[in-house]
Each structure stands twice: as C-alpha cells, then as structure tokens.
C-alpha cells in the first residue's frame, strides 16, 4: 500500500470527517440510536468514496477506520467510564464494535462505489482530488453535519 500526501485543504476535510464520525458514537448508545445509524452509514460511505478519490486502496480505508477503533479502545482503558460513575458493560463493548464495524463496511461500500462510478463515467481515479471535488465533498459533508445536528 502507498501513502498519499495530504495537502492542508484535504487535511481540513479529513478532520471534519473525524469530528463528525466520533461525535456520533455516543448517540449509538442512547435513544438517538435509530436516528444516528443512517447518518453514520452515509458519512462512512462518503468517507470511503473520498478515499477512492484520494487514490487509496480499499485496505487503506479499512486501516484508517481501524485507527479510530484503536484510539477509542485506548481512551476506554486510559479513562475508564467507571472512573466517572458510568458502567461500560460487555454488551456496550459489543455494541460499540458493531457500530464501528458498520462504519468500516459502509466506508468499503463507498470506496467500491466511488471506484465503480469513476470507471463507469470514465473519469478515472486520481491521487489528488480536484478543487471542484473537494467543494462537492464539503457540501455533502455539511449536509451530513446538519442531519447530525438535527439528531442531537
């Protein structure tokens, strides 16, 4: 696998994705669960499609999503919820993993769809997204952020 150099503009977009995706995780544990799920899946798919446009292989998208899982597990061990008077059960751990797994799955779907449509439309896959593409992605990301805000 190769690594793609990330320019500052793309870094900003990726930071927005990370913020949006991680903000949704607590909602997967409470009454908002059914409302969070479709937004989570859409955001993960868009993230995967962006990965295809960034020239990443499918495994690299999965790898990036796994970094989020690893960070969460590290945080749970460094600052266990019980320390703050909250119980984190085995059922909660399984629910968290299922939720993250659905993100990985939908990011993979988005990546595959992105490659398919690039091939189908004849645009090919570049390793550096164009300004127009970044603007379109930011617009879609903004819509997802608005949906998430409505769920909160």
Image (tube, rainbow, N blue to C red):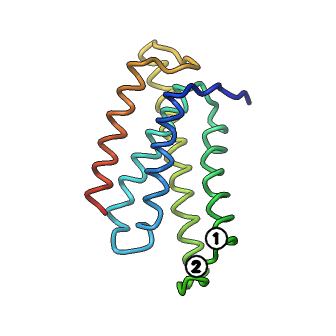
In terms of depth relative to the viewer, which is nearer, 88 or 122? 88
Q: Residues within 10 Å of mark 1 (few under 14, many from 20)?
A: some
Percent position (x, y) of residue 140?
34, 36
Residue 110 is marked as: none
- The answer to which of marks 1 and 2 sits earlier in the sequence is 1
- The vertical placement of 97 against 7, above or below, is below
Q: Residues within 10 Å of mark 2 (few under 14, many from 20)?
A: some
Image quadrant where one finds the C terminus: bottom left
Query: What residue lies at 69% left-to-right and 72% top-to-bottom?
Result: 77
Query: What residue lies at 60% left-to-right and 28% top-to-bottom?
Result: 6
Percent position (x, y) of residue 39?
36, 52
Image quadrant where one finds the N terminus: top right
Residue occupied by mark 1: 76
In the rendered view, does 74 fall on the left or right side of 118?
Answer: right
Q: CB of mark 1 within 8 Å of CB of mark 2?
A: yes
Q: Secondary structure at mark 1?
A: helix
């Amino acid at each position: 696998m190769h690594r793609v150099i990330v320019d500052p503009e793309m870094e900003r977009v990726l930071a927005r994705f990370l913020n949006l995706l991680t903000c949704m995780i607590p909602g997967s544990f409470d009454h908002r669960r059914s409302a969070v799920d479709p937004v989570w899946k859409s955001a993960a798919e868009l993230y995967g499609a962006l990965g295809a446009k960034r020239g990443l292989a499918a495994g690299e998208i999965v790898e990036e999503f796994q970094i989020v899982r690893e960070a969460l597990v590290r945080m749970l061990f460094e600052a266990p919820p019980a320390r703050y008077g909250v119980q984190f059960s085995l059922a909660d751990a399984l629910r968290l993993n299922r939720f993250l797994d659905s993100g990985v799955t939908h990011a993979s779907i988005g990546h595959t769809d992105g490659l398919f449509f690039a091939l189908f439309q004849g645009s090919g896959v570049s390793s550096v997204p164009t300004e127009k593409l970044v603007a379109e992605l930011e617009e879609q990301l903004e819509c997802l952020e608005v949906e998430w805000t409505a769920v909160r």
